[in-house]
């Protein structure tokens, strides 16, 4: 099936890809949004096409106030249902009791443990039962992501992943937002290109990698939370 989808979507633009997903998978497809600029582009396209695709977000409990702002603006503007998934409360309570609220700064292993509890486990619940998972991933975002394809099989999560904006540049994303008056996180205007949890995100300086502001205290090669694992 993957090869057939790749063949049918070869050379298709983002709108056509979303239309294809809607026509072939409909309610069996789900889109994950963190309310970043790429996700806002896809949300706009889904609303524009009155898509049957479900939408969800992961609320880790450590998000920026600005993220909740754009979440609210998105609901008001597009009138879409966006289901929120939260970490298991017992897991969070146990983590904080054993290691405190900032254990993710201690080591890569401790940071990944926090990501596992706050993001990976809720994600598994969010995509369970769906056949296709739509994301806002772009190849330009990191060295890890430029090794992906716009259509791929996610072995870890046992689901087809499709990235409609995979070949878009940052400039194209920003142009789309402005042209279509799409609400976006105001932190993007302050140098925050990739926005995650507040304690783990800083602004990116001139000349730095797109994801340099995420887990900035770690080596560049390790900067993935585990939501998007490549299998090469």
Image (cartoon, grey):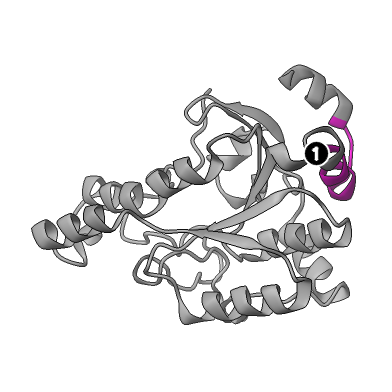
Which residue is located at x 76 percent, y 45 percent?
A: 164
Q: Is residue 11 magenta?
A: yes
Quick one: 128 or 220, which is closer to the camera? 128
Quick one: 102 or 157, which is closer to the camera? 157
Which residue is located at x 41 percent, y 66 percent?
A: 197
Quick one: 133 or 225, which is closer to the camera? 133
Which residue is located at x 79 percent, y 64 percent?
A: 44
Few, some or many residues within 10 Å of mark 1 (<14, 14–19, 20+): many
Quick one: 37 or 5, which is closer to the camera? 5
Residue interval drawn in magenta: 9-20
Residue 53 percent location from the top left of the image = 74, 48
Q: Is residue 157 left or right of residue 78?
A: left
- According to the picture, the residue beneath numbered tag 1 turns out to be 21
Residue 223 in view in this figure:
no
Residue 120 in view in this figure:
yes
Say above or below: 178 vs 168. below
Toward which corner of the image does residue 200 lie, by quadrant? bottom left
Q: Looking at the magenta stretch, what is its main secondary structure? A: helix
Which quadrant is home to the N terminus? top right
Q: How many marks?
A: 1
Q: Is residue 41 left or right of residue 141?
A: right
Q: Is residue 111 left or right of residue 154?
A: left
Toward which corner of the image does residue 134 lie, by quadrant? top right
Which residue is located at x 62 percent, y 78 percent?
A: 72
Residue 65 percent location from the top left of the image = 47, 81
Say above or below: 97 vs 159. below
Q: What secondary structure is marked by label 1?
A: helix
Q: Is residue 62 magenta?
A: no
Residue 207 percent location from the top left of the image = 56, 65
Residue 136 percent location from the top left of the image = 66, 51
């Amino acid at each position: 099936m993957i090869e057939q989808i790749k063949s049918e979507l070869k050379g298709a633009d983002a709108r056509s890809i979303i239309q294809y997903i809607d026509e072939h998978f409909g309610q069996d497809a789900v889109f994950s949004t963190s309310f970043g600029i790429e996700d806002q582009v896809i949300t706009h396209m889904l609303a524009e096409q009155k898509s049957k695709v479900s939408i969800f977000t992961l609320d880790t409990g450590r998000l920026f106030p600005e993220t909740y702002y754009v979440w609210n603006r998105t609901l008001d503007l597009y009138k879409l249902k966006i289901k929120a998934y939260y970490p298991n409360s017992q897991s969070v309570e146990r983590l904080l009791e054993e290691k405190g609220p900032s254990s993710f700064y201690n080591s890569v292993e401790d940071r990944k443990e926090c990501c596992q509890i706050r993001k990976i486990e809720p994600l598994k619940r969010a995509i369970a039962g769906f056949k296709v998972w739509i994301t806002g991933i772009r190849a330009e975002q990191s060295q890890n992501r430029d090794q992906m394809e716009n259509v791929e099989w996610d072995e870890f999560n046992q689901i087809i992943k499709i990235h409609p904006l995979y070949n878009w540049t940052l400039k194209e994303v920003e142009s789309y937002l402005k042209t279509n008056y799409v609400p976006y996180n105001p932190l993007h205007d302050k140098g925050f290109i990739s926005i995650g949890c507040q304690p783990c995100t800083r602004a990116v300086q001139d000349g730095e990698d797109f994801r340099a502001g995420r887990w900035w205290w770690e080596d560049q090669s390790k900067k993935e939370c585990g939501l998007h694992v490549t299998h090469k």
